Amino acid sequence: MMKSVVCIEPGILEVQEVAKPTVKPGHVLVKIKRVGICGTDLHAFNGNQPFFQYPRVLGHELAGEIESVGEGVSLEVGKSVYIIPYLACEKCIACRHGRTNCCTDMKVLGVHLDGGMCEFLQVPENYVVVTQGLDHDQLAVVECLAIGAHAVRRGQIKAETNVLVVGTGPIGMGIVQFAKEAGARVLVMDVNIERLEFCKQQLGADDIIVAGIGAAEKLASLTNNECAVTVFDATGNPAAMEAGFNFVAHGGSYVLVSVVKSNINFSDPEFHKREMSLLGSRNATREDFEHVINCLINNKVTVDTMITHRGALLDLPELIKDWIQPSFGVIKAVVEV
């Protein structure tokens, strides 16, 4: 038997004792060590996460150790790993073109399938990656950073161009770091001044803009009235997503990383006048994960300063009630198993 934390319904997490998985052929049983808390988990807890059904074991930012392996698996027991949580069909049109991140039959751990807020998790071998030289905290945040790395790759950023990242949660912070790594001049916009300062002081953002009245004028002053060549939205706020269309330069791109339960409206004349490219960015590919690992090993990006809160798995039903409160100042919370 093992302990597992289940989201029974919005607002309720419950510790349950369930059967420990028996490893199947082609699969790996991972002893979970760390679980990063993501906006997806918080949205699911609050009841506003798309593609979601209850009850569900949350958790898709996962690091652990190989406990045992099934028949045909060559991975070594005891090795530290991270888990790629996007289980793709590998047959659909997206998968055939290498776009496994937007598989037509995507199954994401912690969303469509039970995730890693438990002591042991069984995962197909192809989604378990042995990694040396990084600790479990770093490995638990790889997936979060991969979202940002994929978004930056979607945006096809060019060095020394103006990039605007709207939203300074962990995903936005990942975008900031990978946009800087790509050589861009990165501006950051949010209503949270403390997070804006964190992005500038800790993550290398070049300048900050307080969202709301005067934001457009500040952006214009910082870009010679040209706006941003690439704008990324990581707010999870429909109104902010709609406002972002006005921040894109003529000939520029707008990358929507946020996923919301809403229709997004924009001015077609403005959209066409600028010949704007509108892009969605979903999940990440193995290539993005590998890029994150390389950047972590070579100290090109950081996660240590992003982790502000941590707690034990069995305390999570109470801890999460605090962590969702803005007054607690959570940037990234990590669960220790």
Image (cartoon, rainbow, N blue to C red):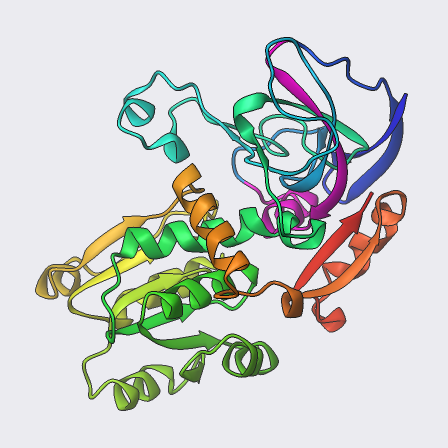
Magenta-span inclusion, residue 32: yes
Residue drawn at x 26%, y 71% is: 246
Image check: 103 left or right of 45?
Answer: left
Along the viewing direction, whichever of 328 and 127 lies nearer the viewer: 127
Q: Please tell me in which quadrant of the rendered image residue 208 appears.
A: bottom left
Magenta-span inclusion, residue 57: no
Q: Is residue 284 visible?
A: yes
Residue drawn at x 43%, y 57% is: 238
Quadrant in the picture for the N terminus: top right
Residue 65: percent from left, percent from top: 73, 35
Q: Is residue 39 above or below residue 87?
A: below
Residue 242: percent from left, percent from top: 34, 62
Residue 276: percent from left, percent from top: 17, 60
Q: Is residue 285 visible?
A: no
Quadrant in the picture for the C terminus: top right
Image check: 10 left or right of 270?
Answer: right
Image check: 326 left or right of 242?
Answer: right
Along the viewing direction, whichever of 183 and 47 lies nearer the viewer: 183
> Which region is colored magenta?
25-49
Q: Please tell me in which quadrant of the rendered image residue 197 appears.
A: bottom right
Residue at the extreme bottom: 221
Residue drawn at x 40%, y 61% is: 233
Residue 190: percent from left, percent from top: 49, 75
Q: Is residue 62 above or below residue 72?
A: below
Q: Is residue 214 above or below residue 258?
A: below
Total numbered labels:
0
